[in-house]
Image (spheres, rainbow, N blue to C red):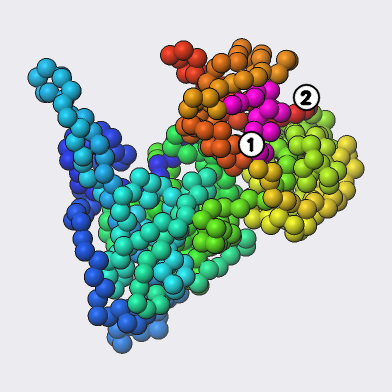
């Protein structure tokens, strides 16, 4: 499935058009260049929601109208400017010329999370930005700084300075969303500020691949409320005007199929970014796969749905709790687990040191296990790489060199040798052991590790399944 992120670029130099995603959507964007940030005189008090005219009777004051009007002051237009270096070529002979700097602008959405000026948007909205401006509902244009970003969940936290407390949106919950219930999307599609669209919850728990197919986002909320380029980072509200999701993507080959990050998942990520500048993920120490009725019949499992434990890291919280490869996780606390994605979602907000109860099925016998997540070891990513692939890595002369290949390992079966270089992991370029370890740590619950290996002038992409069982 091809997914287009909801991002839009504004007018740029013609030479840049081949570099920009969604370049055909440029017509409605603004590109005003550099602006001075001057707080207005009205900034002394919090902006109030626009008042409804007295002529509007009770019948027209529907829940959608009231929710939309109350939300507008807290939704912001995120204006991004980036500087791109591009080498020009002689149009007749093709000789390379001098490097030139071009300014590119893009527009996204966001909303005020906290009255101190904390703003939440998508990580892809601010990617590559050299300056960020938050255009508020009252007309103020405030320079924004990045507090933190989490590309794996496509969330970013910004901060603006204001001489007054800013209006915020109340946060709801996404755990009780109902298929068919009304939702409201607010944002700036095509740079049109303060646009409101409505629809329903079409589905929950959707898994959606990224544009580059290098990662899969899980547990998205699907809606048919119109979401267009420029809506990214804007809130998805329920009928009570509470945030239940953060708009993030559209399905490229369809109409009115949009996706949002559920607010329950976003809440912990945003607070971690605010407090630490990065996401603190608790460690469990297993890899899982989705059990379907077909897989259950093939493997002879006693349950038809759940998360099959395929690998348990030695000494991990899962290992100490007694989990084994072949166990099928059917629940976390009071919530049922029907897939690997559901298990990942339910444990994404786990806190180190806080116990959780796992319901499992082992060889047809149901049982409960008490598991206590922990902070991951500092070298967990490299440890997992050695266990799964049989590779030892060292940093030599600014490159990541394979120094050891375990006999009988998957890496040896694939023909890897000492001296080969690791240049990428899970779709990202790596230049140091620390970068490699951090990327692998963030993807430790994935179903596989993808490495880019360089040998001579060739680069090979190899996949190592995160499975330690022959089931």
**Quarter of the image with the C terminus in it:** top right
Callout 1 environment at 10 Å: few (<14), some (14 to 19), or many (20+)?
A: many
Q: Tell me which residue sits at (59%, 21%) in the image.
A: 402
Q: Residue 311, image x and y in percent?
A: 75, 34
For the view shown, which residue lies furthest in the left direction?
92
Look at the numbered disc 2 and give the secondary structure of its residue. loop
Examine the rendered structure and indicate whether residue 261 appears above or below residue 48. Answer: above
In the picture of the structure, the residue carrying the numbered disc 1 is: 381
Q: From the viewer's perspective, tell me whether residue 404 is left or right of residue 86.
A: right
Is residue 385 found inside the magenta-colored segment of the image? yes
Tell which of 447 and 166 is nearer to you: 166
Q: Is residue 383 magenta?
A: yes
**Residue 426 visible:** no
Along the viewing direction, whichever of 338 and 453 lies nearer the viewer: 453
Indicate whether 29 appears above or below 197: above
Work out whether mark 2 precedes mark 1 in sequence or the reverse, and give the earlier one.
1
Asked whether, in this view, residue 372 is left or right of residue 83, the answer is right
Q: Residue at x 23, y 52 (%)?
A: 29
Label annotation for residue 470 = 2
């Amino acid at each position: 499935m091809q997914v287009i992120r909801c991002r839009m670029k504004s007018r740029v130099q013609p030479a840049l058009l081949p570099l920009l995603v969604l370049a055909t959507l440029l017509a409605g964007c603004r590109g005003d260049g550099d602006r001075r940030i001057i707080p207005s005189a009205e900034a002394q008090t919090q902006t109030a929601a626009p008042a409804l005219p007295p002529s509007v009777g009770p019948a027209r004051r529907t829940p959608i109208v009231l929710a939309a009007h109350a939300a507008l002051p807290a939704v912001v237009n995120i204006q991004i400017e980036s500087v791109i270096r591009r080498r020009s070529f002689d149009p007749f002979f093709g000789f390379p010329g001098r490097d030139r700097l071009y300014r590119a602008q893009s527009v996204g959405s966001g909303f005020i999370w906290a009255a101190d000026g904390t703003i939440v948007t998508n990580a892809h909205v601010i990617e590559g930005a050299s300056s960020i401006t938050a255009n508020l509902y009252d007309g103020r244009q405030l320079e924004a700084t990045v507090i933190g970003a989490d590309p794996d969940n496509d969330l970013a936290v910004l901060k603006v300075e204001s001489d007054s407390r800013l209006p915020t949106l109340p946060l709801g919950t996404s755990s009780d969303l109902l298929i068919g219930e009304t939702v409201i999307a607010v944002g700036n599609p095509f740079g049109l500020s303060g646009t409101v669209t409505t629809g329903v919850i079409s589905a929950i728990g959707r898994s959606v691949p990224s544009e580059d197919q290098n990662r899969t986002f899980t547990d998205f909320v699907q809606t048919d409320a119109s979401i267009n380029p420029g809506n990214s980072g804007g809130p998805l509200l329920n009928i009570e005007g509470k945030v239940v999701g953060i708009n993030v993507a559209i399905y490229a080959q369809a109409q009115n199929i949009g996706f949002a990050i559920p607010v329950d998942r976003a809440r912990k990520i945003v607070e971690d970014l605010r407090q630490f500048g990065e996401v603190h993920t608790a460690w469990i120490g297993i890899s899982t796969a989705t059990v379907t009725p077909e897989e259950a019949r093939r493997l002879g499992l006693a349950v038809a749905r759940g998360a099959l434990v395929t690998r348990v890291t030695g000494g991990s919280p899962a290992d100490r709790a007694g989990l084994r490869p072949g166990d099928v996780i059917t629940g976390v606390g009071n919530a049922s687990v029907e897939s690997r994605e559901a298990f990942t979602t339910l444990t994404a907000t786990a806190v180190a040191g806080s116990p959780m109860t796992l319901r499992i099925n082992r060889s047809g016998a149901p049982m409960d296990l008490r598991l206590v997540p922990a902070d991951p070891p500092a070298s967990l990513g490299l440890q997992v790489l050695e266990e799964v692939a049989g590779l030892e890595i060292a940093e030599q002369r600014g490159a990541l060199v394979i120094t050891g290949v375990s006999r009988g390992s998957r890496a040896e079966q694939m023909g890897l040798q000492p001296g080969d270089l690791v240049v990428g992991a899970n779709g990202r370029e790596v230049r140091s052991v620390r970068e490699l370890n951090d990327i692998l740590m963030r993807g430790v619950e994935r179903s596989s590790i993808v490495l880019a290996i360089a040998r001579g002038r060739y680069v090979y992409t190899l996949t190592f399944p995160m499975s330690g069982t022959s089931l």
